[in-house]
Each structure stands twice: as structure tokens, then as C-alpha cells.
Image (cartoon, grey):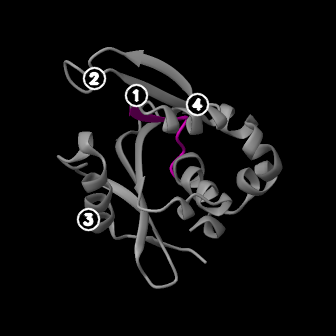
Amino acid sequence: MLDYVYGHDQIVSAFVASLIPHCRRGFGNCKTIGVIDRDGTLLAGLVYYNWDPDAAIIEVAGASRSARWLTRETIRRMYTYPFLEIGCQMVVQRTPADDERLLRQLAVYDYRFIKMPRLFGRERDGVICTLTIEDWQNNRFNKRLHHHVVDAPLEAAA
């Protein structure tokens, strides 16, 4: 059984930054979702940062210490915040080009990829991963949950 915590932005963002080498400098002003187990241990965190309200784009980073965190409910919450609560039209994630596992996971949710040489330094290419609200609404995962996610009241998402 997992639970979700909101409003602990410094703790969750520090946890995520400690697990992602290219995020160790931190995220600045951000919003977070923490995923905790039944013992209250922080298993994973999602950080939303670099919000651009004019373009309606936000960046997201996530990290975990356990694979148990990535449930359907976690994924629903992960995308409810940007798309429904703050009105994003696109989520952006920077991913190292050699992180094949994460890129495969993002492809399942219909992210689009733009390869960027040297995005993580001279010796490490990266990928800008983008997901529009339309791609999210129409992806295979969301087909089953589409009417629940898109039509759910915002209070239910918190």
C-alpha cells in the first residue's frame, strides 16, 4: 500500500536530486509529490520545476529507490498535477541518452524524443522527452483511465 504526500517540496526535491546525478544542484522553486510506503518511508519523488505559464510547459524529474512506486495510481497523479491542476499543454523531461530503460518507459506513454548532443556535458548526450496533453489523453495506458483522469474533479486528484 502506497500513500502520497504533497507540500514537502524541500524534502522530496532533495531526495530526487540525490538520486539523479544531473539534478544534484537542485530544482529551485518547485512542486513535488512524494510516494511513501506503509512504514512512512519515502520510496520515490516527482519534482515539477521550470514552470512557464506563458507556454504552459513544465519540466518533471522523478527518482525512486524501489520499483514498487510506479503504480497506476502514481501515474495518474503524476500527470493530473501538470495537465489538470495547472493547465499544462506539455510536460518536458531531460533524460540521458544512455538511460535506455527510462526511455523505453517514456515511449510507452507516448513521449516524443529529441536527441541533444552534449546535453549533460561534453561526453554525455541527452534526450529532450516531451508529452503533450493530447498525447497523454490518447496513449495506450490512459485509454482505460481516460474518462477517470480527464473528467475527474481536481479535488479527487489531490
Residue located 41% across and 24% down the image: 127
Determine if the magenta segment contains residue 91.
yes
Single out the mark in the foreground, 2 or 4: 2
- Between the residue at mark 3 and the residue at mark 1, the CA separation in whole angstroms equals 29 Å
Residue located 77% across and 57% down the image: 148
Quickly name the residue at label 4: 111
Classed neighbour count for the residue bearing mark 2: other residues with Cα under 10 Å, few (<14), some (14–19), many (≥20): few
Which amino acid lies under the numbered mark 2 shown in the image of this protein?
Answer: Arg
Classed neighbour count for the residue bearing mark 3: other residues with Cα under 10 Å, few (<14), some (14–19), many (≥20): some
- Mark before the other along the chain sequence, 4 or 1: 1
Q: Does the magenta stretch mainly form a helix, a strand or a loop?
A: strand
Which amino acid lies under the numbered mark 4 shown in the image of this protein?
Answer: Tyr
Quarter containing the C terminus: bottom right
- Between the residue at mark 3 and the residue at mark 2, the CA separation in whole angstroms equals 28 Å
- Between the residue at mark 2 and the residue at mark 4, the CA separation in whole angstroms equals 21 Å
Q: Secondary structure at mark 3?
A: helix
Kindly indicate whether the residue at mark 2 contacts the one at mark 3 (C-beta within 8 angstroms): no
Kindly indicate whether the residue at mark 1 contacts the one at mark 2 (C-beta within 8 angstroms): yes
Q: Position of residue 54 (x, y in %)?
A: 41, 33
Q: Which mark is residue 98?
A: 1
Quickly name the residue at label 3: 10
Residue located 40% across and 53% down the image: 63
Quickly name the residue at label 2: 124
Single out the mark in the foreground, 4 or 1: 1
Which amino acid lies under the numbered mark 1 shown in the image of this protein?
Answer: Asp
Task: Please name whichever residue, 12 or 7, is drawn nearer the observer in this view of the structure.
Answer: 12
Q: Position of residue 151 (x, y in %)?
A: 76, 54
Q: Secondary structure at mark 1?
A: loop
- Between the residue at mark 4 and the residue at mark 1, the CA separation in whole angstroms equals 17 Å
- Mark before the other along the chain sequence, 3 or 2: 3
Please tell me whether residue 156 is drawn above or below residue 110 in the rendered image: below
Which amino acid lies under the numbered mark 3 shown in the image of this protein?
Answer: Gln
